[in-house]
Amino acid sequence: MPGNKEQGFSAPRGMRDFYPEDMALRNRLFDTWRQAAENFGFKPYDACVVESLELLKRKSGEEIVDQIYHFKDKSNRDLALRPEMTPTLARMVSARQGTLSLPLKWHTIAQCFRYERTTRGRKREHYQWNLDILGEPSVAAEAEILATAVSALEKLGITGTMLRIHFNSRALLSDLLKTVDISEAKHPAIFLALDKRGKIPDEAISELMHKAGLNDDETAKAWRMLDMHTLDDVRQTVPDSPALAQLDEFIRVCASYGFADRLMFDMSVIRGLAYYTGIVFEAFDIKREFRAVFGGGRYDNLLTEIGGQPLSGVGLGFGDVVIAEIINAYLPNDGESRPECDTAIGYMEESQRSAAILLAQKLRSEGDSVDMALAPEKPKKFFTRTGRGSYQKAVYLGPDDIERGSARIKDLASRTETEITLS
RNA sequence: GCGAGUGUAGCUCAGUUGGUUAGAGCACCAGAUUGUGGUUCUGGAAGUCGCGGGUUCGAGUCCCGUCAUUCGCCCCA
């Protein structure tokens, strides 16, 4: 939309304005996230939006710097708008590592920024719900985090027939690569190369693996790994893999929570971020029409990179942009407006204003939300304005009502009126 | 960073090979109905055609630039 016509101002590229009508969905989403997190015992935390560039570099690598909004402050410090919450979490936990009791479960809704071309489902700014469990090595952590996210999805009306959680395990991929004698040092490069499958040509992926030090034979073996589509295929190759046993246990725990039917093993889920080491997951809509709704996995070395003690954790990031698209596509009637305010009060003349204020204050003290007119209105205008769905009830005061000491409160949906006393 | 499309009233959009004063529907405001709203009728207001430059006797229309936006690619939350 064009912005201010005289000066041509609009929100900068990729940044969003939230008008009151936009806040309805956003607040519902945020409330749902917070309720689910509290329901599962996650503690809220928050942090500054500006981070030191060095912290982000150390975690994400030099090459990511041109995708970050960064700048120098007046003392020449290199700072950045956070592109994700995990480095900040690592910094905060590391600072109190000696005193925090583990495992810890924290959550936050963080606005994150990223400087890149905008496209469907991707802005330069978004809100991301972050769930993290630190200090629990068992798959109970993965299952608990996913159960929390699934709970939020259910509250939003997104059922198992609309969305599936695709999962894989980097540890399992490592076990598979070991069986074909590819050294462990080369695994991370292979993961990052294979993660690009479907995004860049296969030849380019093979080229990436060659650059990572794999010969033709090893590259072919890495490719063959992806031909396995089911856990049974994998089981035949590495029947004794500890990572496979973990996945079996993971599925069992998820079944106890009751959402195992939403899970789907998927060798192509690898995740682009370098720090994942174990189970990884991404949630997609059934039609695969949209980008991932949420994603995450287990990381083991997050704190050691910034000087802390080793601590295993599981994290999940759930953005506000894609889920809004999914809700609009799968639940099209969800956006219908509903009353935002209990009662509207209007009056005919200035001389009824004080009575209107008294009534408004009385109803407010009883807990109703009340929108009282700030100026006199003709009755037709008042009822036209208030009858558009924003209010449940309306009271209109005129001279006769003040004389009688009572007024009629109207239920706007049923158009029925009941008497209330003015006192 | 690369490629393509779009930009006309609050919204959705018409607008002929360049031709006088730029239109429609919905929404809005007023009246019919001077104390009661979702349907009806009548009337009204509202646009520097994203912005800037160029070509032309003349530009919403053609050209260049710029900003915003959408969709791909790179990349990834």
Image (cartoon, coloured by chain):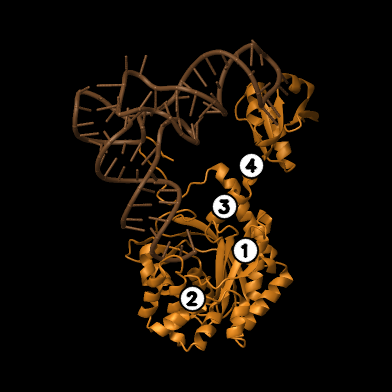
Tag 4–tag 2 contact (CB < 8 Å): no
How many residues crowd mark 1 within 10 Å: few (<14), some (14–19), many (20+)?
A: many
- Give the mark, 4 or 2, whose residue is nearer the N terminus: 2
- Give the mark, 4 or 3, whose residue is nearer the N terminus: 3
Residue A336 numbered tag: 4
- A196 or A402: which is nearer to us? A196
Share a chain, discs 4 and 2? Answer: yes
Q: Is residue A127 left or right of residue A66?
A: right
Q: Which chain is mark 3 on? A: A
Q: Amino acid at mark 3?
A: Ala
How many residues crowd mark 2 within 10 Å: few (<14), some (14–19), many (20+)?
A: some
User: Percent from the top left, x then y, of residue B8?
Assistant: 41, 32
Q: Amino acid at mark 2?
A: Tyr
- Give the mark, 2 or 1, whose residue is nearer the N terminus: 1
Which residue corresponds to mark 3?
A324
Tag 1–tag 4 contact (CB < 8 Å): no
Q: Is residue B4 left or right of residue A300?
A: left
- A262 or A112: which is nearer to us? A262
Tell me: residue B17, above or below residue A149: above
Q: Amino acid at mark 1?
A: Arg
Q: Please tell me in which quadrant of the rendered image residue A2 appears.
A: top left
Residue at figure coordinates x 69%, y 67% from the top left: A261
Chain B's colour? brown
Tell me: residue A272, above or below residue B27: below
The residues bearing labels 2 and 3 have C-alpha atoms spaced at a distance of: 28 Å
The residues bearing labels 1 and 3 have C-alpha atoms spaced at a distance of: 17 Å
Residue A275 numbered tag: 2
